[in-house]
Image (cartoon, rainbow, N blue to C red):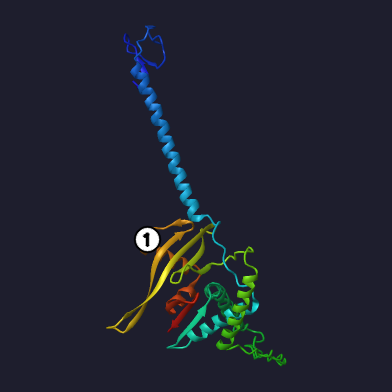
Amino acid sequence: MLSQDIDCQKCACSNKLGTIYCRNCGTKLKFDKRMLDTHKSQKVKKVLKRAVKALFVLAVLTVIAMAFCPWWFPEVEELTDEEEVAAVLTTCKEIDETLAKPNTNASYEFTPAEATLAANYLALEHEKVKAKQQAAMSFGSSAQLGGTGKMGGSSVSGDVSLKLKPKAAPVKAVPSYQQSENARLIAWRKRKNEDAKNAGKPVLSPNFDFIITLKDDKTLSIVLKETWLKFIPARLELCIVPKLKINAKEKTRVLEYEITSAHLGHLPVPLYLKEQIIKLFEEMIMQERKWAKQYFGYIKNIEIVNDKIRVTFSK
């Protein structure tokens, strides 16, 4: 018998709660108020269970929204001066040339906006340019069998190309690091004056994959944006304090990062998950950013000096 049913005292037939006469023998049923109280309490329990389930689902949806909502983040400072952008890219090329040499050691200073542009160029655009250049070199170096060679020489069939080679375009002088550094400083001062004039005006946020900002005199904020499963936006922010530790016995220097806070989207991540956070950050970097991990490996020190980020590369 269900708790909301009434048993006939004569034939023991089960009847629904609220029935006056037995549906089997017609005997008038005896009603107990405690049955009604039990029925009401069961209804209350069902309502409470549904409310708890609804709250749980709402909490899960809220966590997912906080973790993957791509809106309502602070706006990012973007470089708009063409001279300053060109100077930063020249510095990036200078870094490439420096790291191509063995036993090199060099330091570069960036504002947060310049560091953001440099990180995105070195990790993404630079990698695309290198891939295109390698593809063009591999395609241009191959000659078709039975025809004329691509470089104006003889082919396998013996035909000789007598076409005159076009005049080579004049090679533009590549600015040295000191020239690019001076140009970048001049452009930086110019932009500071423009920022003072345009104070209070809205700034459009560029769609950078790397965003580097300063939280205070010691803390560096690094944001890495990714797309999971080709449509889920993911944003991981780490606030770190770079510290250079020196081992006197082994005479070695090791750069360590103390994580002060971490956010997946708007959702704060507990710091006791430090190892998982670093692993997730490294996995996001490796996603189509093979060069980025290489550059991070060459960074030997990071200092914050006068609202600028000084990065030391060593190989």
In the image: residue 37, left or right of residue 285: left
> The C terminus appears in which quarter of the rendering?
bottom left
- Helix, strand or loop under label 1: helix
Position in image of residue 303 (x %, y %): 44, 77
Position in image of residue 231 (x %, y %): 55, 57
Q: Please tell me whether residue 102 is drawn above or below residue 36 in the rendered image.
A: below
In the image: residue 36, left or right of residue 149: left
Name the residue tied to disc 1: 271
> Which is nearer the eye, 98 or 145?
98
Task: Please name the residue shown 33% across and 18% down the image.
Answer: 34
The part of the image, by quadrant, that contains residue 201 is bottom right
Judged from this view, the residue extending furthest toward the left is: 249
**Label 1 crowd bin: few (<14), some (14–19), many (20+), radius 10 Å:** some
Position in image of residue 199 (x %, y %): 62, 67
In the image: residue 41, left or right of residue 113: left
Q: Please tell me whether residue 30 is drawn above or below residue 157 in the rendered image.
A: above
The part of the image, by quadrant, that contains residue 196 is bottom right
> The N terminus appears in which quarter of the rendering?
top left
Q: Give amino acid for label 1.
A: Leu
Task: Please name the residue shown 31% across and 84% down the image.
Answer: 251
Task: Please name the residue shown 43% across and 57% down the image.
Answer: 268
> Which is nearer the eye, 279 or 164?
279
The part of the image, by quadrant, that contains residue 190 is bottom right
Position in image of residue 19 (x %, y %): 41, 13
Task: Please name the residue shown 56% across and 76% down the image.
Answer: 126
